[in-house]
Amino acid sequence: MSTNKVRVRFAPSPTGPLHIGGVRTALFNYLYAKKHQGDFILRIEDTDQARFVEGAEDYIIDSLNWCNIPYDEGPGKDKGYGPYRQSERKHLYREYADKLIESGNAYYAFDTSEELDAHRQDHEASGKTFIYNWHNRLKLNNSLSLSEAEVKEKLDSGEPYVIRFKTPEDETLNLQDEIRGKMTVETKILDDKVLFKSDGMPTYHLANIVDDHLMEISHVIRGEEWLPSLALHFMLYRAFGWDVPKFAHLPLILKPRGKGKLSKRDGDKMGFPVFPLEWKDPKSGDVSTGYREEGYFPEAVVNMLALLGWNQGGGSEQEIYSLQELVEAFSLEHVSKGGSKFDPEKTKWFQHHYMQEADDNVLANDFAALLKQKDLSPSKEYILKVIALLKERATFVSDFWEMGSYFFTAPENYDEKAAKKAWKEDTNDVIEQVKSILKETEDFTASNLQDKVKGWITDQGIGFGKVMQPFRLSLVGAMQGPDVFEIAATIGKEETLNRLEKAQKIL
C-alpha cells in the first residue's frame, strides 16, 4: 500500500435493512478510523444482483447518518478511489482473475452442476464429503486436467466455466487477527473456491480483495462470520504480491435468551427492534420497526452497541460514553473474542440516561409533534412545564403522553379501585371545602396551594389521605403523577375547579 494512513471500510450488501450487528461493525470501523485520524469508507457490495433489494442502499446511508457515524468516502462522496458500488466496478475484476490464471494461482473449471452433484453423491455413498481441491482436481473437468488444446477449444466455443483459486496442496498458513491473535490453517483441508462465476461476475472473495487493495484499505474490521474466509483472502493477497491489511473479526451479537445469533425473530418475539430505522419491504409491504421510530435517541443506540463486545479495559466500569469519548477510548485490543448477549432492558437503561441529559427544548418540539397528531396544540411554555414535571421518570418522548395525558385533557373516567378507596360518603363535602380554598387563592402556585390546603387539613384535624387522594383522583383519574399541587398549578385554577366539580358529579 502506498499510504500509511488508516483506511477502513464498511461493505454491506444491499439485500434488505441493516441489522444492528451491521451497524455495530460500521461503528467499530468509524471509531477506529477517527481514533487514528483515518478515513471511514462505505462500499456497497452488490455483485449478487439476484438478492438486490430496491431502497436498501439508501436505508444503509440513512442509518449511518442517523447514528451520527457518516462515511467520509463512498457513494456520492468520491475521493478518488471510486466508484464505490461493486456493480460499477465489474470491468476491473476480470482483469485480476486473468492475472491469477497467468501466474498459475487459478484455473478454469468447466464442471457442470450435474457433474459436481454426481461427485457429491458418490462421496456421500461412501461416507465422505466431496471437496473440490488438490486431492481430486486433476481428475475433474478443468484446465489443470485438460490439455492446452482442449482448454482453448472449450473457451473458443463459449462453454460455460468458472475460475477457481488453486489452493496450495500442503502448507501451514500462519495468520494473525488483531482480536484473536495467531492462528494456523492447514491448506490441505481447504477447497478451491470459485473466484469468478459463469455469469461474468466475481464472487465476494475476489471482488472484496481487489477493492480493498485498490482502495488502499489498511484494516479489515468485519464480523466473525468471515473468519473462515481469512485463509483464502490471505492467500489471494499473497498470490497478487500485495501487502496484506490487518484483519480484525468482531464477535457475534447473541440472542437475549437461548443460543445463536440475534435475529429479527428474536425482536418480533420479545418486542424490541433489531434495525436502526423502520423498514418497509418493497415486495411484501411488511413493516419492521426501527429504533428511531420507537423513540430511541441515536446516542443511546450507539452507546449500547459500543459496549456489545468492547470495553475500555484497565478495570474501567464506565458505561456512559459520548461519541467523542468512544473515539478516544476505542481500541481493537479490548474487543472481546466471545459473543455478547443482547439485552433489550439495558438498551432502555441507556435511553433513560440520555433522556435525562436531553435539552428540554428539543424534547418539547418532539412532544409538540406528537400532541399535534392528537389535535392538541398547547404553547411551548406549557409543554416545557409538563416535561419538567415528568422527565425524571420518562424514558421516551411518548412517555410524556402515557404518564401525563391529564395535563392536556381532563380524565374521562376514574380508576375503579382507587375511586372505591378514596371516595367516601363525605368526600363531596370535603372537596367542596377544597374548592372554596382554591377559589379564594389568588397566587395559584404549587407552593402557595400546598400551604393553603395542607394548612386547612391540619386545622381541621382530618387525615391527609382523606383529602389528597380524592383531590389527585379528580385531577388525574388515577393515583399517579407528580406532586398534586404541581399538577393543579400547571393546569390552572379554572381547569382544577372544573375537574373537582366533574368528579363530584360522577363519583
Image (cartoon, rainbow, N blue to C red):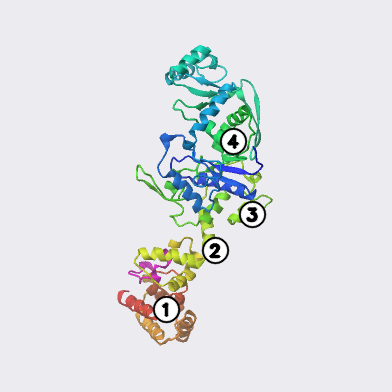
Which residue position holds label 4?
213
Q: CA distance from mark 1 to mark 2?
A: 36 Å
Q: Residues within 10 Å of mark 1 (few under 14, many from 20)?
A: many
Residue 210 magenta-drawn? no
Measured as percent of width and height from the top left, residue 145 is found at 53, 14
- Which is nearer the N-term, disc 3 or disc 1? 3
The mark that comes first in sequence, 4 or 3, is: 4
The residue wearing badge 3 is 317
Chain-order first, disc 4 or disc 2 = 4
Which residue position is annotated with label 1? 467
Left-right relation of 259 to 378: right
Closer to the camera in the image, 417 or 248: 248
The vertical placement of 227 against 108, above or below, is below
N-terminal of the pair, mark 4 or mark 1, is: 4
For the residues carrying marks 3 and 2, which lies nearer the camera in this image? 2
Q: Disc 2 designates what residue?
A: 357
Q: CA distance from mark 4 to mark 3?
A: 39 Å
Q: Considering depth in this image, is 7 or 328 the residue closer to the camera?
A: 7
Q: Which residues are magenta?
A: 400-417
- Whether the magenta-drawn stretch holds residue 413 is answered as yes
419, above or below 190, in the image: below
Report helix, strand or loop for mark 2.
helix
